[in-house]
Amino acid sequence: MKSIICFALLIIFTSNIYTQPVVTCTQTGKFSNGMLSFLLNDKVGFVNAKGNIVIPDTYRYYIQEWGELPYFTDGFTMVQDPETELIGYLNTRGEVEMPCLFKNAYNFSEEIAFVRIEDHVSLIDSKGGALARDILALNAWHSKFVEGLAGVQKQFAYGFIDKKGNFVIEPVYDEIQDFSEGFAAVKKEGKWGFIDKTGAVRIPFQFSNEPMSFNSGRTFVQSKDNLWGIMDTTGKILVEPKYKQAFAVNDGFAVVSTMDAKWQETFYIINADGKTQKEYIKGKNSKETITFRSGFHEGLAVAMKDFKKGMVDPKGKVVVDFLYRELKPLENGMAYFERFDEKTKKVTKGYLTSKGVVAFTIAPPQF
């Protein structure tokens, strides 16, 4: 009976290997709106989280961000007419919902997109209707609406506009970040501080180095000697700068590291107040030492042990085993991986779920 059960399990396991979807492509983009873009023969298509093609590779490769494939936001992505080279919008059913009329077009955010008609930038809604025309936004390719406002550039200075294209925070800053939890880091006269949505300065301009965005009411700020500390929304320093490396707080947890006098780096998982949840002391040898390669994304952080990557949760539990030569942070529930087989000397590439299950693999076309 045991032999029969083992044989049955072997059949199931082997079947899963051979029936696992393989996406043939030369490049992949990022998961968004439940789909992943892929490039094949200079045309872009999309697969779902199971690796099944939902939009065939029939559309011309339109570059919005250098080196980045198109991706869906708010149910739309951009396509380009091969004859006119004008841009339109594709919906998740693979239909061109907004005709190719724009000289340039950019991803939707909060159901609004920046588009360029001739030399003028406008705002459109998800039905293609114009919300604002000829707005003075020179860097629309970087702009997106976050918490109702979008950062734009005018005459070499930055400010924020509302969804009607009006400046609600005048362009007087040298650099800006998007709003997060009602605060935006902005730089003026060489120093960083934080403003609220009315433009009022909430935390004075005092930081020489760029701070991180707020999450869980906390942010990391950097001292003159490049160490990171934790600050709350009142500007109070909760943890004095002591971390050599810090990954942004996410859902109440962060990954940080310290460096001792012997240049020994130790990693920690901490909560938003700086309390240590788990400490990763150097092991007896390099094969036992765990280091981190990312902060928490969707509840998991990429860590490395014996030159192989895996993922751990905020309690330090290993959720994805240390098996991968390359492993990217989770993005909409999926993570890119590369795994090297010591016996065959072959590399398998594909995507994992948040539980470490291989959803599908990717492979280059065979010529």
Image (tube, rainbow, N blue to C red):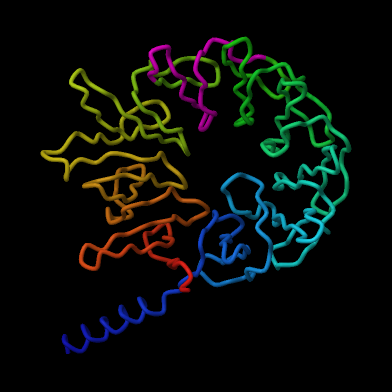
Residue at image point 72% right, 44% down: 110
Q: In screen coordinates, is 184 left or right of 249? A: right
Q: In screen coordinates, is 323 left or right of 206? A: left
Which quadrant: the N terminus? bottom left
For residue 341, which quarter of the picture?
bottom left
Coordinates of residue 142 in the picture (x, y in percent) = 66, 36
Location of residue 309 with respect to 347 vertically, above or below:
above
Q: Nearer the viewer, residue 93 or 234?
A: 93
Location of residue 218 with respect to 146 vertically, above or below:
above
Coordinates of residue 158 in the picture (x, y in percent) = 71, 23
Q: How many marks?
A: 0
Q: Nearer the viewer, residue 46 or 200?
A: 46
Coordinates of residue 97 in the picture (x, y in percent) = 80, 62
For residue 285, which quarter of the picture?
top left
Point out the stretch of residues depicted in magenta.
201-227
Residue at image point 67% right, 69% down: 58
Q: In screen coordinates, is 162 left or right of 17? A: right
Location of residue 23 with respect to 163 vertically, above or below:
below
Q: Residue furthest left?
A: 284
Q: In screen coordinates, is 136 left or right of 8? A: right
* Residue 217 belongs to magenta span: yes
Coordinates of residue 313 in the picture (x, y in percent) = 36, 46
Residue at image point 31% right, 30% down: 276
